[in-house]
Amino acid sequence: MTAAVFAMAGGSVVVAPLSAAPDKVGVSAYYECYGTTGSCIAATNMTTDTVTIAATGGSGAGPTYSWAKLAGDTFTITASTSAATAFSASVNRNSSKSATYRCTVTRGAATYDVDVPVYAQYIYASDTDPPIGPEP
């Protein structure tokens, strides 16, 4: 991120650069059920691992964190104003959901955006489905 420069009567003040990085590039959740339709629920609630944004640099108050969806399916954000959060969604059998969420980190007048891909999938195979791979 480029440092923000503010003009003042006596010259200029430079706000130190702010940077942020996630502890994971993306987060995901998977659920698998093999059996009859009656033994596998129609939809399941899934929660991803936690992703944490580590912010360094900058000056002034903060940092503060704000998570928002950029594109894709809607997930529930477990902590929308925290550096660490997870995502949850209800996913139907043989379905998946995906989205990109952005964490905007703010310290003083500086901001930095981190985009995090989120994915959840429910895999279902009935007892009558053919084998997925070659039989031993």
Image: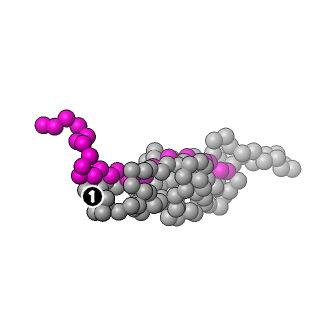
- Asked if residue 93 lies in the magenta stretch, the reply is no
Q: Look at 55% across and 56% down and name the residue there.
A: 74
Q: Look at 47% across and 55% down and name the residue there.
A: 52
Give the magenta part as a residue range.
Answer: 110-136
Find the residue positioned furthest to the front: 128
Per the image, label 1 sits on a secondary structure element best described as loop
Q: Would residue 23 be seen by someone viewing this image from the given angle?
A: no
Q: Please name the predominant secondary structure of the magenta segment in the image.
A: strand
Colour theme: one colour
Using the image, determine if residue 136 lies above or below residue 118: above
Q: Name the residue under label 1.
A: 36
Residue 78, image x, y percentages: 50, 64
Q: Look at 23% across and 52% down and name the residue there.
A: 127
For the residue marked with disc 1, what is the amino acid?
Answer: Thr
Find the residue positioned furthest to the right: 9
Q: In which quarter of the image is the C terminus?
A: top left
Residue 37, image x, y percentages: 31, 59
Task: Decide which of 90, 10 is in the foreground and name it.
Answer: 90
Q: Quadrant of the N terminus?
A: top right
